[in-house]
Image (tube, coloured by chain):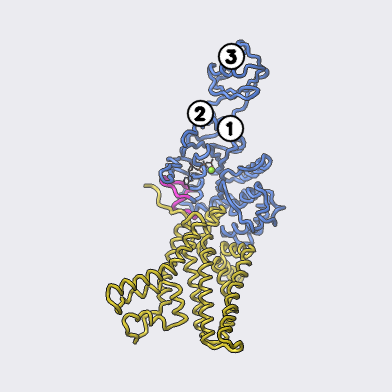
Amino acid sequence: MRNDTVSKDWRSKLINPVLDKEFRLRMRTPRTMWTLLAYLFAIGLFALSSIYLLNMSSGNAASFNPSESRMLFYFLSFVQLGLISFMAPGLTAGVISGERERQTLNLLLTTQQSSTTIILSKLLSSLSFMILIVISTLPVYSMVFLFGGISPAQLLLIFFFYLFLMIVIGAFGILFSTIVKRTMIAVILTYGVTLFLYAGTALIGYVAIMVSMQVSGSSASNEWIVHIFSWNPAVAMYSILDPNITREIVYSGSGSTASEPFLQLWQEFMLIYLVLAALAIWLSIRYLRPRMKQSGK
Amino acid sequence: MNKAEQTEIKVEQEAGVSPEQDQGAVPMIEIKGLSKSFGSFHALKSLDLTIARGKVFGFVGPNGAGKSTTMSILATLLSPSSGYAKVDGFDVTKHPAEVRKRIGYMPDFFGVYDQFKAVEYLHFYGASYGIPKKEREELIPQLLELVNLSDKRDAYVDTLSRGMKQRLCLARCLVHDPDLLILDEPASGLDPRARIEMREILLELKAMGKTIIISSHILPELAEMVDEIGVIEHGQMIAQGNVSEIQNRLRVKRILYIRLLERLEEAEQFLQEQPHVTRLMRDERGIHVHFSGQDLEQAELISELIAAGYRIISFSEGQTNLEDVFLEITRGGDGFE
Ligand SMILES: Nc1ncnc2c1ncn2[C@@H]1O[C@H](COP(=O)(O)OP(=O)(O)OP(=O)(O)O)[C@@H](O)[C@H]1O
Ligand SMILES: [Mg+2]
């Protein structure tokens, strides 16, 4: 009896009504299945066609050398990064505004569920679908993994990085979904931010380096400028794949390659975006319900 | 019924929680100087409204008067620009969670999660109000019974008709046994039969001792079940009281219906000039006359008509209803937009 209530308590803490509802409804839509299949198909196609291409170029169908396998791994990782970045805005930017447009949000907001529960459950449930998707690509990865050239730690780290990036993009998605009335605009804004993370930061970094080279002569580029690149997900992920890259970039100007940099680029990336994602989630929670300014004045 | 007993027990239990000591003295709804602006547009202008426990309050007003706005504020979905609104003694801005516990809100427009079955739909909201599964399993069949949807318990919500959805939404409002029901046009879009059903359900809820605030455009229907009506226009409460009080205040005493054989237009002109006639409406067969006089004056009016040579087919005295009150109050009130 006691045991029973305790386990119920655990269950009710882990699976709150909003989360439960999201899981049920999401799994009921055929769209979920189709998205999953389409994704697996895309990844599988990339993997197989690149294996085929590598085979063509090496000419030897029987053996695969580690550097080729690593190449394939890099390639797959970036494709998956791209797909995640492409999907995350679409999956998360509609979660609140979608309910608003279907006129179910008001009903949800008058229940006892706290804003925090609603936002976090929505974020988690929309991401859990993507986590499922990414995990389902593991077999494709292990195919590459078997050929060698990549460490298990790196593989784990890559998947952790994916998870983190999903949360970051999801946090922005849910923020726009909360503060913007229309899903369409929330989706566009989230894609905009995602695009900025890649192209915007790269462009700013490139321009900054160019300008500082112009100003201070040739080699002595300022150290802070290279940190602009730690804002870029692609660069950050590359620093996991190739750990030397951080040192090369950070000390590219100064020429001294003696010591390890304080933080890897991807670590820097995670620190920065941890703060930003937390901020976005906090703002979403705050603005989900109307700001109850104290009346009277 | 035992549901009513439940409600009473709940009220007693919560007496300790309420910030004000004397339970009986705390009105269910207390609104003072409530204003709401959307940008430079003032949707509510210093609205006052008090509704006692157990009363059914009809909220009447033309489109855009501010009914839904007031109800959204009560439901903690909008924050007031100034003034305050209290539910059961709890300020909606300061203790929204306490307010939410006590209200069942039915918006004028609402959506449903299509992929849920009716029972699942109610289970979800029940769970969202923190009701344990065991209790829900007992409660939900009762609720479905109350709104006559027992046979649709396993139907997907998107297969339900509009009226059924409306009733399902009403059942949803009741899932946490709230003391106050805020119903924004619960009968809109329903056919006459469904409206009668809705009204019967509401009467049952009234019998359970719930306080209900209900807005509607179908005024004659309201008249039979409300204890009080409030008339709102341009964000201001322009009249409030029980139905007959308001009718008196607005001096719509009687409505006479005169059917004439011919010369309808002429007769209308003629009636216009008679004393105590406040308003005229003509249809193909006769004329509705709003009349503020007593029996004597009424008798005189008839003899005047006959003396003037009008041939009367019939002369009847109608019951003034809310519709007339509504038209009277809001006459010429459309020119603000
Ligand atoms: N979110 C909003 N932004 C701007 N104006 C609004 C908003 N909500 C309501 N209004 C305005 O406030 C006024 C009152 O609207 P409300 O919905 O309360 O009217 P109502 O009495 O419910 O009307 P109806 O009988 O048509 O339902 C309207 O003029 C409306 O245009
Ligand atoms: Mg309305």
In the rendering, what colour is chain B? blue
* Cα–Cα gap, marks 2 and 1: 15 Å
Which mark is drawn over residue B300? 3
Is A211 colored magenta in this rendering? no
> Counting other residues with Cα less than 10 Å from the Cα at mark 3, is it few (<14), some (14-19), or many (20 or more)?
few
Q: Is residue B200 left or right of residue A108?
A: right
| Between discs 3 and 1, the one toward the N terminus | 3
Which mark is drawn over residue A237? none
Residue picked out by circle 1: B323
Is B96 colored magenta in this rendering? yes
Residue at (51, 49) in percent of width and height = B75
Give the amino acid type for the residue marked by disc 2 in the picture: Arg
Residue stretch in magenta: B78-97
The chain shown in yellow is which? A
> Who is closer to the viewer here, A13 or A162?
A162
Q: Is residue A6 left or right of residue A230?
A: right
Residue at (63, 16) in percent of width and height = B263
Which mark is in front, 3 or 1? 1
Q: Position of residue A7 (x, y in %)?
A: 59, 71
